[in-house]
Amino acid sequence: MGPKEIDTATLTGKLEYCDLRELQAVLTFKTLWPRFEERFGSKEMLDVRFAQLAELRNRLRHSRTVDDVTRKDGEAALIWFRQVLAHG
C-alpha cells in the first residue's frame, strides 16, 4: 500500500471517508452508542455539537457568509469536542 492509499479494511481507514454527519450516525447508532455514551454524555448534546460544527463547516465550504452566531456556535462545538476527546 502506497503512502497515499487508505486501507479501507480497517475502521480507521473507513472513518477517513466519513463526513461529519456519517461519523455522527456511527457514534449514535443504537448498538454502538453504549461504547461512546460515557465519553460524550448524551446523544442530544452530541447531536447539538455536531449540528453546530456541520453548519459552520458547510458555510465555510460553500463560501457562504458566516454570521457571528454560527461562528461562535462552531467554535463552542470545537472546544467541546476538544475537551471531551482529551479526557480519555
Image (cartoon, rainbow, N blue to C red):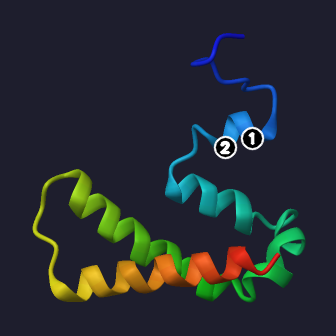
| Quadrant into which the C terminus falls | bottom right
Which of the 4 image quarters holds residue 67?
bottom left
Q: Position of residue 70 (x, y in %)?
A: 26, 81
Q: Nearer the viewer, residue 11 or 79?
A: 79
> For the point 72% across and 10% down, which residue is it?
1
Whole-number angstrom distance, CA of label 2 to CA of label 1: 5 Å
Identify the residue position indicated by label 2 in the image.
15
Residue type, numbered disc 1: Thr
> For the point 16% across and 73% down, which residue is it?
66
Which of the 4 image quarters holds residue 59?
bottom left
- Tell me the number on the disc at residue 71: none
> For the point 60% across and 88% down, which residue is it?
45
| Side (left or right) of 44 relative to 73 | right
Identify the residue position indicated by label 1 in the image.
12
| Side (left or right) of 66 relative to 20 | left
Q: Secondary structure at mark 2?
A: helix
Q: Is the residue 32 above or below the residue 67 in the image?
A: above
Residue type, numbered disc 2: Leu
Residue extending farthest to the left is 65
Q: Secondary structure at mark 1?
A: helix
* Disc 1 residue crowd, few under 14, some 14–19, many 20+, Cα 10 Å: few
Q: Are marks 2 and 1 in contact (CB under 8 Å)?
A: yes
Q: Is the residue 78 above or below the residue 58 in the image?
A: below
Q: Is the residue 80 above or below the residue 30 in the image?
A: below
